[in-house]
Image (cartoon, rainbow, N blue to C red):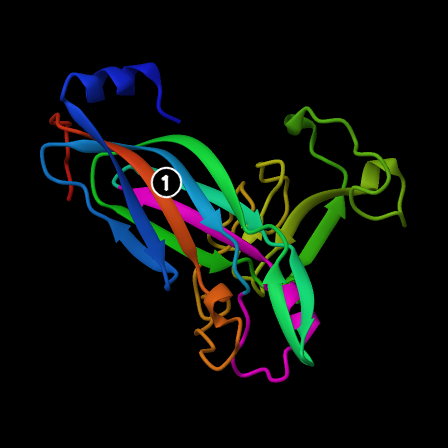
């Protein structure tokens, strides 16, 4: 969102409000001129249907498998990650099945400060068929009480039903909801937030240009930001 300090910079001629359109691909860049920096104030994420062009006819289960995406804005020293889930509608038109986003877009207000070029990436959450959760009692150092029934498994008592770890991509990445190494064996690259890595299993699919609804099968975002004409320390560009 545009805060009062940004409004004052714009009105005094020290900054300009700009926008950047991102689309067609899962990886792109917002340039930041030298001797300046930007503040991303908002962005509109247009939901899309990420489907495998090799699968024909369209299989609903495949569409649902690819319904959750990660979005990141990364510059030198800064990284903002989002998890976004898309809901679909099935539409039949003259005997043709179309898959369309139920909610066309979602708007986010932000205040992201970037002093170098911003790399924007969108990728899929790893296939949940590969997830391998670990349930157990939380270590005392988390200072968290045992979770109620339903937070892990119902086969054990209340002190055994908390999800402590999830292997996301076939034992390549661990997600720890409580952010602590609680004596569990961890894979390299473990993290405290729910996001996966960008690899062959999570990269966006190619656009299927033969489908009538192909214009809804790739990313589209409008990013608003304020370009501030002031020098900020940049140790790497």
Pointer 1: what residue? 79
Residue 75 location, x and y as percent? Answer: 28, 42
Q: Is residue 215 above or below residue 44?
A: below
Image location of residue 14, percent across then percent down: 14, 22
Query: Which range of residues does the magenta coloring cover?
Result: 50-75
Left or right: residue 213 versus residue 90 is left
Would you say 85 lies left or right of 118 here?
A: right
Residue 45 seen: yes
> Which residue is at 67% across, 61% downward?
89
In terms of depth relative to the viewer, which is nearer, 191 or 218?
218
Along the line of sight, the residue nearer the viewer: 204 or 167: 204
Dot 1 lies on which element? strand
Q: Identify the image quadrant of the N terminus.
A: top left
Q: How many marks?
A: 1
Placement of 32 over or under 103, stated as above or below: above
Q: Is residue 34 above or below residue 45?
A: above
Q: Nearer the viewer, residue 151 or 72?
A: 72
Q: Which quadrant, please, contains the C terminus?
A: top left
């Amino acid at each position: 969102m545009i805060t009062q300090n940004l409004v004052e910079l714009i009105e005094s001629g020290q900054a300009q409000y700009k926008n950047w359109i991102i689309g067609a691909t899962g990886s792109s860049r917002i340039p930041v001129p030298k001797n300046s920096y930007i503040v991303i104030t908002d962005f509109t994420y247009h939901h899309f249907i990420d489907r495998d062009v090799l699968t024909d006819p369209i299989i609903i289960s495949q569409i649902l498998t690819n319904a959750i995406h990660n979005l990141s804005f990364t510059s030198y020293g800064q990284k903002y990650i989002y998890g976004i889930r898309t809901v679909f509608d099935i539409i039949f038109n003259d005997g043709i099945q179309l898959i369309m986003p139920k909610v066309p877009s979602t708007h986010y207000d932000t205040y992201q400060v970037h002093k170098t070029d911003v790399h924007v990436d969108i990728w899929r959450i790893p296939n949940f068929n590969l997830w391998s959760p670990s349930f157990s009692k939380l270590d005392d150092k988390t200072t968290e009480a045992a979770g109620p029934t339903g937070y892990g498994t119902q086969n054990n008592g209340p002190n055994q039903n908390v999800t402590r770890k999830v292997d996301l991509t076939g034992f390549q990445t661990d997600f720890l909801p409580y952010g602590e190494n609680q004596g569990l064996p961890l894979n390299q690259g473990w993290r405290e937030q729910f996001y996966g890595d960008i690899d062959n299993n999570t990269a966006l699919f190619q656009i299927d240009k033969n489908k009538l609804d192909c214009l809804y099968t790739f990313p589209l975002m409008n990013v608003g930001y304020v370009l501030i004409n002031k020098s900020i320390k940049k140790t790497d560009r």
